[in-house]
Image (spheres, helix red, strand yellow):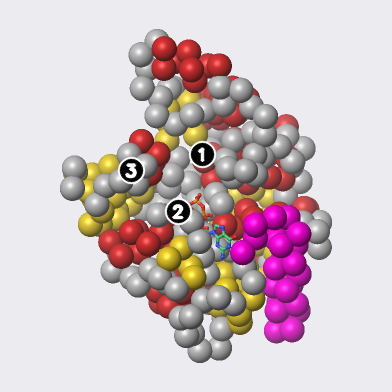
């Protein structure tokens, strides 16, 4: 059993490769929910959707969000009607958000709603929201505080950020399912996901860090030198007081991480790290990296 901690791009790329070696039923994925948002009356859980669509074989792997071949008729009509839907939601994708919203409104937990969606999509891996407590990542910007989705999607990351906050009415608790998955797995893999907005919220759920300390944990860096492979991780690391590189990531994970994997092109020195080609530009490269990571787990 392998458990991943995941956001919506880097780690899913690694999971895509791992599926060549490990049956989906032996994979659990603890997924960030701090980017969740209610939009046009429905519930988007962007990272959960990416992971569900990946296992269901319908993910658009050009963008790493949304459903391959989806249409955007409803989105376009909403804009024409004057609704400010700042995320381009596809029609089929929207059906999932509608179904999730309906289940949450009927009183189901996010964990149960996700399990039902997974089962309807034929997903056999365990896709686990990190918590059932609503929680959101906000950033402090020149123009005041913004929900992370607004900062990244609406303003395309073009705002200076000076701080990162997590907002929730009560401290987020990891679910029993999440802690069970971490405890019962042979290894926990943190793929190359954003340490602040994707992995940070998972680590912030009560119980996760303690469970990780008792496990073999491997983390793959999303940085090469002082730049992430893609996305806003640099500004977020800096605004949180960390170097935007593999050393900064290691500092964030140091109390539980056993093996750091860096890219072979990464000039940042980390004692004891393993250097591999981590750029998963296609499925074959994902499979190659996943194979190398499995050998690290079995060597331990
Ligand atoms: P998000 O939810 O879309 O932000 O997705 P994640 O947090 O899961 O992944 C974003 C991170 O993935 C970024 O910081 C990128 O640097 C990293 N990333 C994306 N593709 C790759 C890749 O092929 N290799 C590595 N090493 N990192 C990657």
Q: Secondary structure at mark 2?
A: loop
The residue lying toward the viewer, choosing from 16 and 213, is 16
Locate the N terminus and report the quarter of the image it occupies: bottom right
The percent coordinates of residue 114 (x first, y second) are 61, 39
In this rendering, the answer to whether 262 lies above or below 271 is above
- Residue at 58 percent across and 63 percent down: it is 191
Residue 97, label in figure: none
Mark 2 CB near ligand 1 (8 Å cut): yes
Q: Is residue 91 left or right of residue 249?
A: right
Tell me whether circle 2 and circle 3 mark residues in contact (CB < 8 Å). Answer: no
Q: Earlier in the sequence, mark 2 or mark 3?
A: 3
Q: Nearer the viewer, mark 2 or mark 3?
A: 2
Q: Secondary structure at mark 1?
A: loop
The residue at 30%/46% (across/down) is 158
Label 1, on which residue?
45
Residue beneath label 3, please?
Answer: 151
Return the residue at label 2. 231
Magenta stretch, main secondary structure, is helix
Which residue corresponds to the image point at 48% horizontal and 13% vertical from the top-left? 77
Residue lying furthest bottom in this view? 271
Q: Give the image location of residue 260, x and y in percent.
A: 55, 78
* Magenta-drawn segment: 279-300
Some atom of ligand 1 lies within 8 Å of the CB belonging to the residue at label 3: no
Q: Where does the C terminus fall, quadrant-wise?
A: bottom right
């Amino acid at each position: 059993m392998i458990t991943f901690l995941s956001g919506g791009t880097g780690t899913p790329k690694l999971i895509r490769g791992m599926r060549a070696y490990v049956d989906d039923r032996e994979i659990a994925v603890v997924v960030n929910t701090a980017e969740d948002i209610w939009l046009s009356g429905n519930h988007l859980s962007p990272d959960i959707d990416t992971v569900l669509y990946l296992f269901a074989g319908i993910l658009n792997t050009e963008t790493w969000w949304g459903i391959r071949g989806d249409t955007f008729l409803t989105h376009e009509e909403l804009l024409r009607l004057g609704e400010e839907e700042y995320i381009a939601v596809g029609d089929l994708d929207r059906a999932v958000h509608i179904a999730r919203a309906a289940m949450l409104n009927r009183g189901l937990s996010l964990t149960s709603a996700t399990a039902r969606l997974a089962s309807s999509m034929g997903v056999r891996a365990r896709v686990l929201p990190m918590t059932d407590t609503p929680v959101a990542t906000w950033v402090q910007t020149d123009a005041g505080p913004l929900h992370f989705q607004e900062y990244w999607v609406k303003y395309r990351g073009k705002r200076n950020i000076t701080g990162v906050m997590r907002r929730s009415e009560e401290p987020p608790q990891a679910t029993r399912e999440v802690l069970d998955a971490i405890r019962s797995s042979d290894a926990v893999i943190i793929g190359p996901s954003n340490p602040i907005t994707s992995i940070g919220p998972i680590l912030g759920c009560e119980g996760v860090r303690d469970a990780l300390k008792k496990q073999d944990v491997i983390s793959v860096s999303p940085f090469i030198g002082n730049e992430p492979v893609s996305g806003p991780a640099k500004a977020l690391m800096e605004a949180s007081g960390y170097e935007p590189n593999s050393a900064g990531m290691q500092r964030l994970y140091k109390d539980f991480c056993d093996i750091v994997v860096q890219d072979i092109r990464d000039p940042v020195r980390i004692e004891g790290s393993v250097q591999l080609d981590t750029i998963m530009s296609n499925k074959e490269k994902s499979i190659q990296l996943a194979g190398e990571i499995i050998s690290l787990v079995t060597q331990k």
